[in-house]
Amino acid sequence: MPSESRTLPSSFRDPSGFLFDREGGLYRQVNRIYKDHYDQLLSSGLYKALTERGLLVRHDEVDISPPDPQLAYKVIKPQLVSFISYPYEWCFTQLKEAALAMLKIQKTAFDFGMSLKDASAFNIQFVDGRPLLVDTLSFEKLRMKPWVAYRQFCQHFLNPLLLVAYKDFQLNQLSRIFIDGIPMSLTSRLLPFRTRLRPSLASHVHLHALSQKYFSTRTVRVRERQVRPVSLAGLVESLESLVRRLSLRLKKTEWAHYYQETNYTPEGFEWKKKTVEEFLDVMKPETVWDLGANTGVFSRLASRRGIKTVAFDVDFIAVELNYRDCLDQNERNLLPLVMDLTNPTPAIGWENRERKSLLERGPVDAALALALVHHLAISNNLPLPKIAEFLSRICRWLVIEFVPKTDSQVQRLLATREDIFEHYTRSDFEEQFSRPFLIVKVAPIKGTERTLYLMKNYRCP
Amino acid sequence: MIQTKLFLRAITLLILSLFLLPLCGYSYIDLGSGSYIIQLLIAGFVGFSLSVRIFWKKIKTRFSKKAKPDKTLDAQ
């Protein structure tokens, strides 16, 4: 393999090909073993149909030397995804939209004599606000055999959706533990009894789990069975109708109604928005991460300027509301994601390198940390130097709001705990943040005791 | 209600057939074999329902097509 190519650590399972980067560009080698399937994808019109509908990533065939010439058939250059997100960072509607996109792709593939051989949720990315299949090598010629990716679809999409819809939204985090999807047996055990009375759930989940259990302890032989196309279509339709009917009843959470419970005056709130916009004019970022974005009011100041913005929040319901707004308003530049900044997404999978940590996906051009620092420092006992260090590792520019102890919101946080935060003062804050950052602008927020800062990271040019 | 009853009957059949499947063939199966078998059963059932629906739709279309010229004749 030429030394300048580096195979991506997540791209090793499929013998059909692999992703590699070379001189900052991302490419995919298509192996000879996959030649017939790849040619059919293009010649059948499936590639054209799916890319026109915005369901499959576009690519160009390029004339560069492949990293592994003995195996190579072609090298393609896929369209780049601005931010890679993972299923355990998605809200309910994002996962549902991704599941429906996967089933729509499968139905379209049937029409062109092909089928999905992979239905991994990691193959879906959100691009321009919509789910997109980013693995071009996921298709194979349609054989009259069972859908090989059926179990994977259930484990990656159906099970987390059901657990969130029927049990608790916090169970979406199980996808982080089970990298190949939530097991059928666990889902079956966790779901309430009433789900056994719904025919589609009884068959796709409970009987499925029972069947797995029964056959896992027996060495049996099965006939190579033929499946009629109408049966395959029926299976996909059955899954689609099941997923489409799932909904999430929104409960009131700590953060989802945050903006109705703040202590800003309307003028102060507008002033804060205007100041953030002025800071954006100075920074001119191409990418923004809004940390603790809630339902994305401030994220939209960036995304509506055409800046690719990721809105992180720990609150699943706030992210759900934010994504629903994105869908309603057809927003293309905003990606809401669930993220606990006190325990950000770690690197997981084989060698701890298969799925990236949050830090590995940075640094971002600019981060917004508005009304966040007091939650990290006081609710989570994080010392200011630690917060400054973390933020300096993820962004080139930083817009940060300091909320002093005298602020009524901080007083609420301190109401039930001893005040052990003697170093939580504005001067300490400025001193600690001045180490990794240059403080460019300081702007007290009108009508409050809070202050907005614009900072530039010394480490990132 | 009738639909629910039909579904419940179908599930009973699924459970029974789960344990009565002919277990002969060419290759040893792995842990995914349970998924493979349940898929065959579901696909068989929903495929049959879909076939019936398509067949019924065809019949309806044929009769509605025949009915139209009659109406035209009546009108003349």
Image (cartoon, coloured by chain):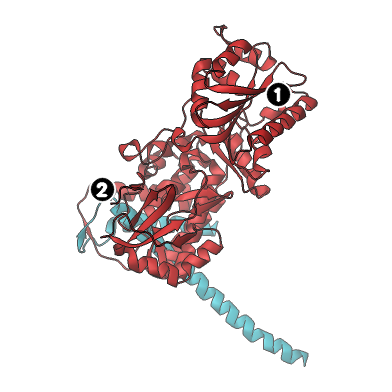
Can residue A144 be seen at all in this image of the molecule? no
Name the colour assigned to chain B in the rendering. Answer: cyan
Q: Residue A422's image quarter?
A: top right
Q: Which chain is home to disc 1?
A: A
Q: Which chain is home to disc 2?
A: A
Q: Residue A416's image quarter?
A: top right
Can residue A26 be seen at all in this image of the molecule? yes
The amino acid at mark 2 is Ser
Of A292 and B53, the residue lying toward us: A292
- Residue receiving disc 1: A262
Please determine whether, in this image, residue A170 is positioned above or below residue A95.
above
Name the residue at 21% across, 55% down. A220
Which disc, if any, is residue A216? 2
> Of tags 2 and 1, which is closer to the observer?
1
How far apart are labels 2 and 1 at the CA level? 55 Å
Residue A2 in percent (x, y) is at 30, 51
Of A170 and A282, the residue lying toward us: A282
Please determine whether, in this image, residue A430 is positioned above or below residue A72.
above
Of A192 and A45, the residue lying toward us: A45
Assign a secondary structure to mark 1. loop
Direction from residue A239 to residue A454 in the image, left or right:
right
Q: Residues within 10 Å of mark 1 (few under 14, many from 20)?
A: few
The amino acid at mark 1 is Thr
Residue A264 in percent (x, y) is at 74, 23
Question: In red, which chain?
Answer: A
